Image: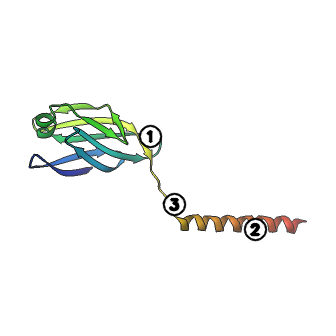
Amino acid sequence: MQFLDSSWNGEAITVEFITNSTLSDLTIDDAAKRISFKATGVEGTVGFSRITLPNSLTQDSWNKEYSITVNGQEVTFTTLTDSKNTYNYMTFQNQLEWLIPVSPITVIVLAVILILVLAFVVLIILKRK
């Protein structure tokens, strides 16, 4: 569960995200009437999110006309409302989540290991002759 604390019309609001993905770059664009975020997870899997927004934002300000963007793509969502909040449910394709950061040092270490393995194979071949 993640929270985005923001303010709207001088009022502090909290947006709640429940998801099976890793979210980043959470933004609320009041002028564009848009909520956007990036979602990462295992590539090719389906992600889901439930975003809880206060009715003061979705109904009073946006008149129930807003969009949700995930990874730069507008998504279709289902909405349920109670007396305080609007709950938005959606699914989307997860983007690749890099588990190993690639740095110049990582590349150098991998190159050295590859050279050592190749040298070992060449020595074995030469010994057999």
Residue lying at 42% horizontally and 42% vertically, measured from the top left: 94
**Depth check: 9 or 22 in front?**
9
Q: Position of residue 97 (x, y in %)?
A: 44, 50
Dot 1 surroundings within 10 Å: few (below 14), some, or many (20 or more)? some
Compare marks 3 and 2 and give the one earlier in the sequence: 3
Residue 102's tag is: 3
Compare marks 1 and 2 and give the one earlier in the sequence: 1
Helix, strand or loop at mark 3: loop
Residue 101's tag is: none
Give the Cα separation between the discs numbered 3 and 2: 26 Å
Helix, strand or loop at mark 1: loop
Q: Tell me the kind of residue under disc 1.
A: Thr
Q: From this view, report whether residue 7 is shown above or below residue 104.
A: above
Circle nearer the viewer, 3 or 1: 3
Q: From this view, report whether residue 40 is shown above or below residue 88.
A: below
Compare marks 3 and 1 and give the one earlier in the sequence: 1
Give the Cα separation between the discs numbered 1 and 2: 40 Å
Dot 2 surroundings within 10 Å: few (below 14), some, or many (20 or more)? few
Residue pointed to by mark 1 = 45
Residue pointed to by mark 2 = 120
Give the Cα separation between the discs numbered 3 and 1: 23 Å
Circle nearer the viewer, 3 or 2: 3
User: Does the image show residue 82?
Assistant: no
Indicate left or right for 55 with 72 as reference: left
Q: Tell me the kind of residue under disc 3.
A: Val
Placement of the C terminus among the 4 image quadrants: bottom right
